[in-house]
Image (cartoon, grey):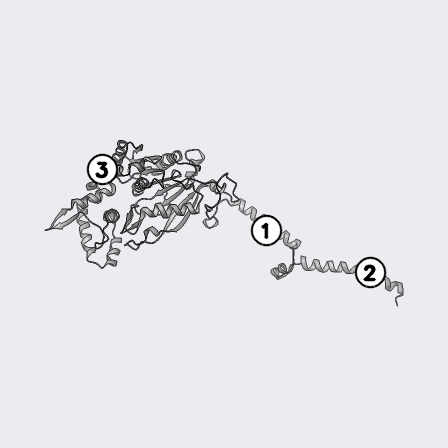
């Protein structure tokens, strides 16, 4: 039997042991892994030591993986909205890519509504963001680059790594580049408003520009916007700059389709003469088809006939006529081909009527900070270099400063080099890079 002193000692010992037992129980609950970590986390007010250590290890692994992987996927980056405040650049928490980031987006195109060809009201853009876009919260000038007939997607002549090398050595300054395709179901829109193909002028100057200004850190002013393009895109760029100095401040046109007074008859649309017979036959065939079938037939042509059909739908449309909805200058009468001179003049005016256009838009062109044209001296379209020289001469005669650069080669020769060594430096000199 225990005596009273022993009993008292045991009571004191038991009282002293209670806190130690409690600590042991708490340690068991909080530091021992369970099969329901989520339930444990919700039932405790603070993270246990072991959980904190595991989190630290995880974050260390993530940091090591991030530093070892400089490339990023498209889904991992979204454009920083234009609502971010301008002013002194501040570092961005996002690590910059090694080259300009190429971002593909699909935008709505309300300007193309009510076209007769069933064209989609959604269009794709390709956007090049400079490296420093991810380092500083500053704003950038924008070049809108218009593609040629039938072209879509990112052109090979705008290589992100090469562009960045040129920027690094000071050949060009950092700009946002937006690639716009004018391709449609006929092959090309020529970037003009038409009741048949849709309002492509409005699409570029309103839908595209407003989207880019709303979603990216641009300098939203004409003096900080340039427009350029090749072939169909080159002539489209000249026309859009001429009509919209309130949108664009400078233009660089590569191998644009331009007519002097004699070029239309030599063009791929009317030469050789068999082209005329083919188009008259096409027009007669489609006029006999139901409207939907005729539109499908229009969209399934190929070659130079398709180019002529797209050109006519853009520049000489007649939505009240039967498909192909084009006023064509030739028709058969008594088995012989005849030409309507009034309609012929309308066909000439698409790429031509240059003196009239320069006179009509002289004030607009005088507002531009720069106009430049380049072409290959040996272009397979022999009328094209003549048209470029003619356009430049007419601008000069009207007192409008411009550059004309001629290169050895043909329609496509040295296109990347021309963009890198002439187009981008031109915009680096003419666009405004601050507010």
Q: Say if residue 263 shows up in the picture.
A: yes
Q: Which residue is mark 1?
A: 58
Any mark on residue 13, and which?
2
Q: Say if residue 271 shows up in the picture.
A: no
Identify the image quadrant of residue 265: top left
* Drawn side of residue 164 relative to residue 299, left or right: right
Looking at marks 2 and 3 on the same chain, the residue that comes earlier in the sequence is marked by: 2
- Is 204 in front, or is 419? 204
* As drawn, 254 above or below 20: above
Any mark on residue 313, and which?
none
* Percent position of residue 409, x then y: 29, 35
Residue drawn at x 45%, y 35% as measured from the top left: 168
Q: CA distance from mark 2 to mark 3?
A: 112 Å
SS at circle 1:
helix
* Mark 1 closeness class: few <14, some 14–19, many ≥20 residues within 10 Å: few
Looking at marks 3 and 1 on the same chain, the residue that comes earlier in the sequence is marked by: 1
Q: CA distance from mark 3 to mark 1?
A: 69 Å
SS at circle 2:
helix
* Mark 2 closeness class: few <14, some 14–19, many ≥20 residues within 10 Å: few
Q: Which residue is mark 3?
A: 260
Residue drawn at x 67%, y 58% as measured from the top left: 30
Q: Nearer the viewer, mark 1 or mark 2?
A: 2
């Amino acid at each position: 039997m225990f005596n009273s002193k022993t009993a008292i000692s045991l009571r004191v010992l038991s009282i002293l042991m209670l806190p130690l037992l409690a600590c042991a129980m708490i340690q068991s609950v909080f530091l021992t892994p369970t099969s329901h970590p989520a339930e444990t986390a919700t039932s405790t007010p603070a993270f246990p030591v072991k959980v904190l250590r595991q989190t630290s290890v995880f974050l260390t692994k993530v940091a090591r993986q991030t530093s070892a992987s400089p490339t990023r996927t498209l889904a991992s980056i979204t454009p920083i909205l234009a609502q971010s405040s301008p002013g002194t650049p501040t570092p961005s928490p996002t690590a910059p890519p090694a080259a300009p980031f190429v971002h593909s987006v699909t935008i709505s195109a309300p300007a193309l509504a009510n076209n007769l060809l069933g064209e989609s009201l959604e269009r794709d853009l390709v956007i090049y963001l400079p490296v420093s876009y991810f380092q500083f919260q500053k704003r950038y000038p924008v070049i809108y680059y218009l593609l040629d007939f039938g072209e879509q997607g990112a052109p090979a002549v705008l290589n992100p790594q090469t562009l960045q090398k040129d920027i690094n050595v000071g050949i060009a300054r950092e700009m946002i580049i937006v690639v716009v395709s004018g391709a449609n179901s006929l092959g090309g829109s020529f970037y003009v408003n038409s009741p048949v193909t849709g309002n492509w002028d409005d699409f570029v100057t309103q839908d595209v520009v407003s989207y880019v200004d709303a979603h990216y850190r641009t300098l939203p002013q004409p003096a900080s916007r340039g427009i350029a393009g090749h072939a169909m895109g080159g002539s489209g760029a000249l026309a859009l700059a001429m009509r919209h100095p309130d949108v664009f401040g400078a233009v660089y046109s590569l191998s644009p389709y331009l007519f002097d007074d004699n070029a239309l008859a030599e063009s791929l649309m009317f030469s050789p003469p068999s082209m005329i017979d083919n188009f008259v036959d096409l027009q007669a065939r489609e006029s006999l088809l139901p409207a939907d079938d005729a539109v499908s037939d229009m969209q399934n042509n190929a070659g130079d006939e398709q180019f002529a059909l797209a050109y006519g739908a853009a520049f000489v449309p007649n939505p009240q006529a039967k498909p192909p909805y084009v006023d064509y200058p030739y028709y058969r009468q008594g088995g012989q081909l005849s030409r309507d001179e009034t309609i012929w003049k309308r066909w000439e005016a698409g790429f031509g009527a240059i003196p009239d256009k320069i006179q009509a838009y002289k004030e607009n062109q005088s507002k531009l900070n720069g106009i430049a044209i380049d072409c290959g001296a040996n272009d397979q379209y022999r009328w094209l270099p003549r048209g470029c020289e003619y356009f430049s001469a007419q601008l000069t005669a009207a007192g409008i400063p411009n550059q004309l650069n001629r290169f050895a080669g043909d329609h496509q020769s040295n296109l990347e080099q021309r963009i890198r060594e002439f187009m981008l430096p031109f915009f680096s000199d003419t666009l405004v890079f601050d507010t």
